Image: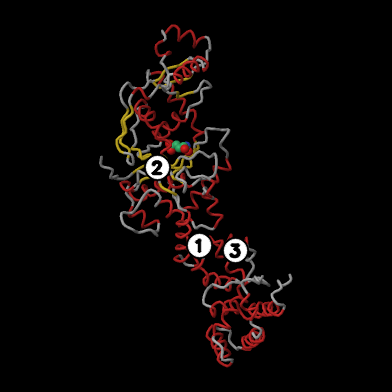
């Protein structure tokens, strides 16, 4: 089949608000967003909150904020499915009236016996159409007596066939399908009824959803037809697997959009990463803006095999975004972490300069803020093991003390001046520059790696540099005793 899609389309994302938006749902929303943006049309957000016990309003808000945060854009909604139940019942009544559906008075107990027998025989239980065969007078009598009933769809006796964009030609034989329930005995519509009525009323042209719904589609297709609706084109997305090749689970860490956000993943990176988890742009591009993905998006390149969620790859990609976005673009995302770290009240210019200096070395926003902590802490904790080399060098404290004094005496605290001062001192002492560079870095950051040292010192500033060097000297002179609080 030709899968090329011409717009305008009407697509929907229809989450059930029973939990946080997980990455599988987010990816479904992303493909709907990409398709709608690439060919034009409308993206509808529909909250499928008919399961009152499992749905809640807080989750409905949460899902919307996660979708907005990640960068998907919906044109219509959110519509609450729970507000449309009357409409679903009304359409079921039409099917009853025109004979496409029928009342079933079989009790759960009666069916249970048959179900057990089918199971024992190793076959699937299909409703045996007992009530379809019941004489009309009997049905009328049951109805008049107020006997409880469900409403079932009269399924066609043919195969149900449809072309799935991802899975290709699908064919379900009649013996695999039964007259499923549209309305329960309390009159409430089932998921199948609600979803199809809503898709028709909302004019949905393409249904992109998870593979877990593939077994529902042979029910939905005849129901669309029975209701006089146009059957949309389906695309069922393969599962997202964990590294153990089983369905992605909590065992490997975060699975919800919210959790990734809290770990310091950027929405742009998560969007990009999830988009590539089951789709490719046809070339080897990996870091792509939403606009680039929209331009490259075609459903032909949705994969039909399961995707493994590679956390390291996401972290790598996030690092790429931290690197490529301007500090101004990063700032709104960084701010919560800055606040959490207690740095919100610090000098903004100095904070931004430090962030700028370290951003090539962080893969998450949380890490980035962690890296600039030394600029703002009144004291650092030095690890005696990591400082063993410095502790052994008896002449180091005096040398560093001299360097500290020279730094203090500089009229301008610039990286050029700082470098010149350090190099002059090492030359005077006939030592290599590294003899001063390494302990100075340790003194200022309690770490052996980081950005170019003189940039670091300049951003650190005169006061913090003096303070950290002073404490490091004390630490060395005390023979590596952890500095006291
Ligand atoms: N509400 C369903 C779910 O959250 C989705 C239904 C659909 O996309 O058709 O799994």
* Earlier residue among tags 3 and 1: 3
- Residue drawn 64% across and 88% down? 402
* Earlier residue among tags 1 and 2: 2
Disc 3 + disc 1, Cβ < 8 Å: no
Q: Secondary structure at mark 1?
A: loop
What is the x, y in percent for residue 472?
67, 77
Q: Ligand 1 is located in which of the four quadrants?
A: top left
Q: Secondary structure at mark 2?
A: loop
Residue density around tag 3, few if under 14, some if 14–19, many if 20 or more, within 10 Å: many
Q: Alpha-carbon distance for marks 3 and 2?
A: 38 Å
Q: Which mark is residue 238?
A: 2
Give the position of the N terminus as an image quadrant.
top left
Q: Is residue 275 above or below residue 178?
A: below
Q: Is residue 96 above or below residue 332?
A: above
Q: Which mark is residue 167?
A: none
Camera-near label (3 vs 1) is 1
- Residue drawn 54% across and 85% down? 433
Residue density around tag 1, few if under 14, some if 14–19, many if 20 or more, within 10 Å: many
Residue beneath label 3, please?
Answer: 338
| The one of 165 and 399 positioned closer to us in this rendering | 399
Residue beneath label 1, please?
Answer: 363
Q: Is residue 265 above or below residue 185?
A: below
Camera-near label (3 vs 2) is 2
Q: Alpha-carbon distance for marks 3 and 1?
A: 16 Å
What is the x, y in percent for residue 308?
43, 48
Q: From the viewer's perspective, is 173 left or right of 272?
A: left
* Earlier residue among tags 3 and 2: 2
Disc 1 + disc 2, Cβ < 8 Å: no
Q: From the viewer's perspective, is 96 left or right of 372?
A: left
| The one of 39 and 152 positioned closer to us in this rendering | 152
């Amino acid at each position: 089949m030709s899968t090329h899609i011409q717009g305008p389309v009407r697509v929907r994302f229809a989450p059930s608000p029973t939990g946080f938006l997980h990455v599988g749902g987010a990816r479904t929303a992303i493909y709907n967003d990409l398709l709608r943006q690439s060919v034009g049309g409308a993206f509808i957000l529909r909250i499928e909150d008919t399961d009152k016990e499992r749905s809640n309003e807080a989750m409905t808000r949460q899902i919307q904020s996660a979708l907005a945060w990640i960068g998907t854009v919906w044109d219509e909604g959110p519509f609450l499915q729970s507000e449309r139940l009357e409409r679903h019942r009304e359409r079921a009544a039409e099917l009853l009236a025109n004979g496409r559906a029928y009342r079933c008075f079989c009790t759960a107990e009666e069916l249970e016996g048959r179900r057990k027998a089918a199971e024992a025989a190793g076959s699937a239980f299909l409703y045996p159409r007992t009530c379809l065969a019941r004489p009309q007078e009997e049905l009328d009598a049951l109805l008049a007596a107020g006997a409880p009933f469900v409403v079932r769809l009269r399924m066609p006796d043919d195969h149900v066939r449809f072309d799935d964009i991802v899975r290709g030609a699908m064919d379900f034989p009649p013996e695999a399908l039964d007259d499923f329930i549209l309305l329960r005995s309390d009159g409430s519509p089932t998921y199948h009824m609600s979803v199809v009525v809503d898709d028709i009323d909302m004019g949905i042209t393409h249904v992109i959803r998870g593979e877990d719904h593939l077994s529902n589609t042979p029910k939905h297709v005849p129901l669309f037809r029975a209701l006089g609706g146009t059957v949309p084109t389906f695309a069922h997305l393969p599962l997202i697997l964990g590294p153990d090749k089983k369905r992605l689970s909590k065992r490997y860490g975060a699975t919800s959009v919210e959790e990734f956000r809290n770990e310091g993943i950027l929405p742009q990176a998560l969007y990009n990463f999830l988009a590539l988890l089951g789709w490719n742009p046809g070339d080897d591009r990996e870091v792509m803006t939403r606009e680039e993905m929209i331009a490259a998006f075609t459903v032909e390149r949705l994969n039909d095999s399961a995707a493994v969620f590679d956390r390291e790859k996401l972290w790598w990609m996030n690092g790429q975004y931290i690197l490529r976005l301007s500090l101004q673009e990063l700032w709104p995302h960084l701010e919560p972490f800055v606040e959490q770290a207690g740095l919100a009240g610090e000098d903004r210019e100095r904070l931004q300069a430090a962030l700028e200096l370290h951003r090539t070395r962080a893969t998450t926003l949380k890490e980035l803020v962690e890296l600039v902590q030394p600029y703002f802490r009144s004291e650092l904790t030095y690890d005696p093991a990591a400082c063993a080399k410095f502790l052994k060098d008896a002449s180091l404290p005096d040398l560093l003390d001299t360097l500290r004094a020279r730094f203090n005496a500089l009229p301008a605290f610039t990286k050029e001046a700082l470098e010149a001062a350090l190099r002059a001192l090492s030359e005077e002492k006939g030592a290599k520059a590294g003899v001063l560079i390494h302990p100075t870095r340790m003194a200022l950051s309690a770490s052996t790696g980081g950005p170019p040292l003189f940039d670091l010192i300049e951003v650190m500033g005169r006061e913090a540099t003096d303070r950290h060097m002073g404490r490091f000297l004390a630490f060395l002179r005390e023979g590596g005793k952890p500095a006291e609080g």
